[in-house]
Image (cartoon, coloured by chain):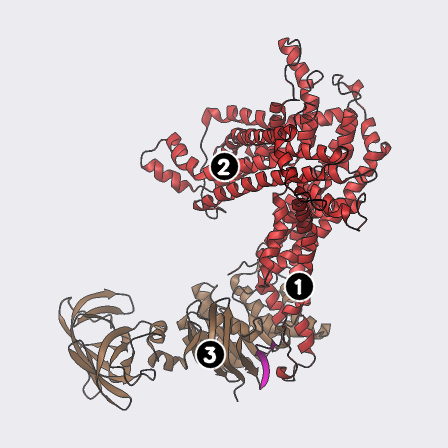
Chain colours: A brown, B red
Amino acid sequence: MAFIDIAGIGKRFGKVFALHGVDLAINEREFITLLGPSGCGKTTMLRLLAGFLIPDAGSIKVSGRLYSSPRGTLPPEQRRMGMVFQNYAVWPHMSVFENIAFGLRIAKTTRGEIARRVARVLAAVGLDGLAERHAHQLSGGQQQRVALARSLVVEPTILLLDEPLSNLDAKLRERMRGELKILQRDTGITFIHVTHDQAEAMALSDRIVVFNKGAVQQVGTPREVYERPTNLFVADFMGQVNKLPGTVVATSGGRARVRVGAQTIDVELSASRKRSDASVTVAIRPEAIRLGAADAGAAANVLRGRLVESAFLGNIVEHHVDVDGMLVRVQGDRRQGIAAGSPVELSIPVGDCVAMPSETD
Amino acid sequence: MQAAARLGASPDAPLDAQAQPGRRIGGQTVVLGLAVAVLLCLVGYPLAWLLFGAFGLPQSFGLEHLERAFTRPQNFAALLNTVQLALGAGSMSILIGVPLAWATARTDMPLRRLIHALVALSYITPPYLTALAYIILLGPDAGQFNRLLRALFGFASGPINIFSMPGVIFVIGIHVFAFTYFLTHSALKSVDAALEESAQMLGAKPWQTTLRINLPLVAPAITGGALLAAIESMALFGPQAIIGTPAQIVFLPTRIYATIGGYPPRWGEASALSLLLVVLTVAGLALQRGYLERRSFITVGGRGVRSRRTALGHWRWPLFAFCLLLVFFSAIAPLGVLTLTAFAKSWTEPLSFANLTLQHFFTALSEDQVAVRGILNSFKLATAAATLAVLIGAAVAYLDVRTSARGRRLLDYLAILPLGLPGTVMAVGILLAFIRMPLPIYGTLSILLIAYVARFLPLATRSANATLRQIDPSLEEAGRATGASWWGAVKLILLPLARPGLLVAFLLVFIPAFGELSATILLYTGGTETIAIAIYRLNDLGQLEVVSALAVFTIAVVLTLTAVVSWLSGAGPAFAETPTRG
């Protein structure tokens, strides 16, 4: 049995279903990210895990022990989880030291022990020398570290992080991202992280859980979710994608021949496609497409079109190519220059073309 | 917290075995039920009795009281006078308030903050004290200002008689114009300069910009303020009685007072008249709410708003002189004359060193029994009322802000309701409700306490509500996640953070309760006089010097506490960074 076992969780606020039928198994020492747009239910899931909300259906078990069910929940203070809030929630009426010592004092730890453990965790998060500061004397990044230290000092087995990086500026965000990853590896704590930033999710996580409209869309490693999205929503949310409407001509195993415009290509079939669907949408990432003839020997599709325009974006050049009236975005080498209006060939590995149902829901 | 205790017994056991229905809501339900019960007793029960009383209950049932409320000539006159007063004071509030607001908000007039503070002072001063001051200033014969006018221009008598309808409107107007002033001031401040500059770029002259951009933008605030001023003017028993009654001009509150004070007291008629006053008030408030909703097109709050001041050039000082003249009448003259009178051996004698004395303060603060008792009672009552109101208000606010308990909206509504009720009406309801009850509180301080808590509960509730809203719930949740129980998080995190705000709530109740007159006048008996009653009665006895000494004392208390409030509200830099709702 998994470390954390979430089964059939449902939660409603008034008439709005925030979550329905969520099943999820989380392993010990895993860095897992709940990813999705705002209002998708990911924060509700996190607050259910923390014990601030009571589910309307389903159960949450940790190490086989029931934590939450509609009939009752273990209150947050008895779950021995840590939580880092989006706004850090550093208590403004306490110093950094007092903030971090709070949990230890509640647990009636001796003074010497408190001093020792706070000093250790302060060093671990790089806040030495700031113990006597108050919240308003700290930068956003420092408040973030206080919030982390406060949760870590009580040595939880699970740490919940609610968009911890979203209030930091871009550079600091990148640095904290690295530190979080290292912290998780070093402490062996199970991190459950909520974000709407897919790049952050991919950089940090062992596995990603994509949420939309209160339901889990896909669970998988960053690579699986990015390269093999199960539906259009996931494909769209994880990054830029070309969505080409097509019709299935023939299928064999997990692959199919699909007519796109006036041309046909070979594609992978996504797991969510129903057998009966003849019309599908083929998702292709812009960076998977190469401008020019395919390498000999590789199993690649070829689409013929006409270059509409190219935009120089610094590290790459983005080309817009008209393929039988459909606009296809291609990310190409910045040194590659082709005149607008020229006929071009696009080569795409078969494994990078995924056919899925056209409807997102 | 119940769940914590229940489930906390052995967190290692599966929850299924011990979880019971009811969850954490158990504790909340108790608090909610208690709050509803207290509010119903304080607010709902007296109001119900008011309604019953107007229909003649419990002795009989009929419409004769309501009918009499309209047809009896004295009552009809009172209604007409009240409406006239409301219209007069409302118009006056626009005439004084809007130019002052424009001068302080949108021009480079010198000493704008002084003028602003003096407007606040005219509002803080209890209006019955302003009325007393104007008796000293504009009494038909002995009034200081009248004597000055006679000396300057050789009038044979008068020339101004404060004991008249214009006199009442004037005295009340210089108090209630503050509503129009403050609403207009903040509306003008929140008009972004870009809106005016756009008009200018399209060729509008400054006066055209003012007329076609600024005025329409702030018009709802002006109207809303004037309506509030009109509503408030109807409820001000003090000046209506102190100036209106000697001139034999009755208003609804003074008429209600007379119907109950006469023998035998006519309860039914008083209830009917009270209902009439409530209807006028509620109609006004509904109108006002409508106007304020139309304010939505202004960037309320003014965050990031750049506002521009008109450069007046040569007109800076003349405009200042004009504004100073207005606040001279509303604040400087009344407070000045009360102070001078309090220190004068005889108020009709001219000011000189020989005429100075501290005797009146001695009389007021230690000799006169009623005055001394009044001061003590006022301190006791205001402290108790403020404490209770903050306790109830904080509970109501917590339920509203922090929980999703059903019924919390109704609770909030009940706690805000008294805001729309004149003190006189409240007192009639409380009299009717508690005079019959087997609760022996009539004639004790308790009945006054009930009235004060009920009247000023909205102030505490709104203040506590605003305080709790500013404290992000994640701060308490972080405490829970770190191992604190519900009560632990409230005690160690919420209360320390809310303390300055709750202290402000306490003072916001204490200040008006300390000088309360309109409900007290109907509820006090011998022995339960307050400072306002002492002032009112000594004024009837003509002891204006002792009255002035008491007035100066009252104003000193009120001003000191108001200063503490604004210091507290502006302070708290350590908490300035409290995260707000993300």
Decide: few, some or many residues near mark 3? Use Cα within 10 Å; few <14, some 14-19, many ≥20. some
Tell me the chief SS of the magenta region. strand
Please give left or right for residue B305 compared with residue B537 in the image: left
Disc 3 secondary structure class: strand
Return the x and y of residue B477 as percentages of the image width and height: 60, 67
Q: Amino acid at mark 1?
A: Val
Q: Is residue B566 above or below residue B241?
A: below
Marks 2 and 1, the one that precedes in the sequence: 2
Q: Are marks 1 and 3 on the same chain?
A: no
Q: Report the residue that reaches farthest toward the left.
A: A342
Mark 1 touching mark 3, by CB under 8 A? Answer: no
**On what subunit does the disc labeled 3 rest?**
A
Gap in Å between the C-alphas at discs 3 and 2? 54 Å
Decide: few, some or many residues near mark 1? Use Cα within 10 Å; few <14, some 14-19, many ≥20. some
Point 60% across, 23% down: residue: B166
Q: Amino acid at mark 2?
A: Thr
Q: Amino acid at mark 3?
A: Gly
The residue identified by callout 3 is: A21
Q: Are marks 3 and 2 on the same chain?
A: no
Point 55% across, 24% down: residue: B321
In the image, which residues are magenta? A64-74
Q: Which label sits on residue B490?
A: 1
Mark 2 touching mark 1, by CB under 8 A? Answer: no
Quadrant hosting residue B234: top right
